[in-house]
Image: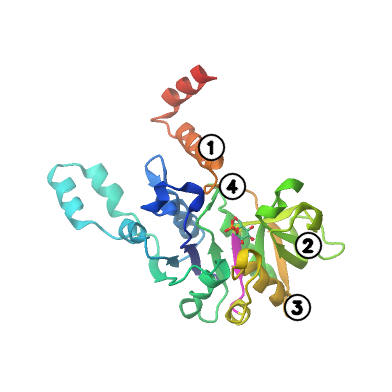
Amino acid sequence: MIKKAVIPAAGYGTRFLPITKAMPKEMLPIIDRPTIEFIVNEAVESGITDILLVVSGNKNAIVDYFDRNLELETILKAQGKDFEYGMIKHIGEGANIHFVRQREQLGLGHAVLQAETFIGNEPFAVLLGDDMYVNHEYPAIKQMIDVYEEVHASILGTMEVPHSHTHLYGITSPKKGETGKLKELESVIEKPKPEDAPSRSAIGGRYVLSPSIFKYLRNQERGKGNEIQLTDAILRMMADEKVYSLDLDAKRYDVGNKVDYIEAIIDFALQDESLKAEVLEKLKKKI
Ligand code: G1P
């Protein structure tokens, strides 16, 4: 059973400057909850009991968010605001949440390497803090965890992207003859130009990894963008063990992208019975 997850949340958030100058991008709200909470909840709803958030120096708001705020709890109770009290008290209760600081931002591979001691020698999940997946019935990472139980090998969560977008993702190359949602991979390449892309099947920010990944990450040389890339370590691991891709069945929002972020807010507003009618009315007027 996969019980541990790593959520890298140490990036600078340059796509969302200037707000991210003073606030972690993972705290950007989808209405009234930070994006990171949705990612933590996906892990919790998938049976994860221990989550390691890999953070950096300016991310204390994330630590505070998952901690209790006893002063506020006392005030809300005294004011008889039981609903609000319950709302803040239960944040972060679904799993044990741990933190480690990535002292230098050397890339995603380096961020995942910070989890080595926490993970030990068991397979684990990785959920990128920028990528929100919504499937209330069957969370994206649970889809991968279930497949792990069958294949007992690393799995990369994938989706099809337009040819012109391959330079934004890790792109997978299935072994010959592999078809369907689950494919054994031949190779993977980080952010290839369209003309160099072996397929349009992109890694969407979800991984189930064998603990042997750390062996490759420890001595992984810098790759694309002069960063230590997780994709490059996975490629080296592929020479020694099987790696699969699984097409995920869920709505994905890249909340590091402004248009996706706005779409997520609109979608969540339209799913919220207390907001839906008014928001829809305003949207209709605009259109
Ligand atoms: C990272 C990974 C990339 C993956 C992407 C998904 O890139 O390196 O392989 O496709 O996340 O969001 P980033 O977007 O952090 O540059």
**In the image, is residue 26 above or below residue 207?**
above
Q: Are marks 1 and 2 in contact (CB under 8 Å)?
A: no
Name the colouring of the figure. rainbow
Element type where label 1 sits in the image: helix
Q: Is mark 3 within 8 Å of ligand 1?
A: no
- Image quadrant where one finds the N terminus: bottom right
Residue drawn at x 73%, y 58% is: 192
Element type where label 3 sits in the image: loop
Q: Taking the image as drawn, is residue 153 in sight?
A: no
Point out the quarter of the image occupied by ligand 1. bottom right
* Stretch of the chain drawn in magenta: 206-211
Badge 3 is on which residue? Answer: 239
Q: Is mark 4 within 8 Å of ligand 1?
A: no
Badge 1 is on which residue? Answer: 263
The alpha-carbon separation of the residues under discs 1 and 2 comes to: 30 Å
How busy is the neighbourhood of tag 2: few (under 14 within 10 Å), some, or many (20 plus)? many
Badge 2 is on which residue? Answer: 173
How busy is the neighbourhood of tag 4: few (under 14 within 10 Å), some, or many (20 plus)? some
Element type where label 4 sits in the image: strand
- Image quadrant where one finds the C terminus: top right
Q: Amino acid at mark 3?
A: Ala
Q: Position of residue 30 (x, y in %)?
A: 43, 42
**In the image, is residue 91 above or below residue 101?**
above
In the rendering, which numbered label is found on residue 252?
4
The alpha-carbon separation of the residues under discs 4 and 2 comes to: 21 Å
The alpha-carbon separation of the residues under discs 3 and 1 comes to: 40 Å
Q: Taking the image as drawn, is residue 38 in sight?
A: yes
Q: Position of residue 154 (x, y in %)?
A: 66, 70
Q: Earlier in the sequence, mark 4 or mark 2?
A: 2
Q: Are marks 1 and 4 in contact (CB under 8 Å)?
A: no
Q: Amino acid at mark 2?
A: Ser
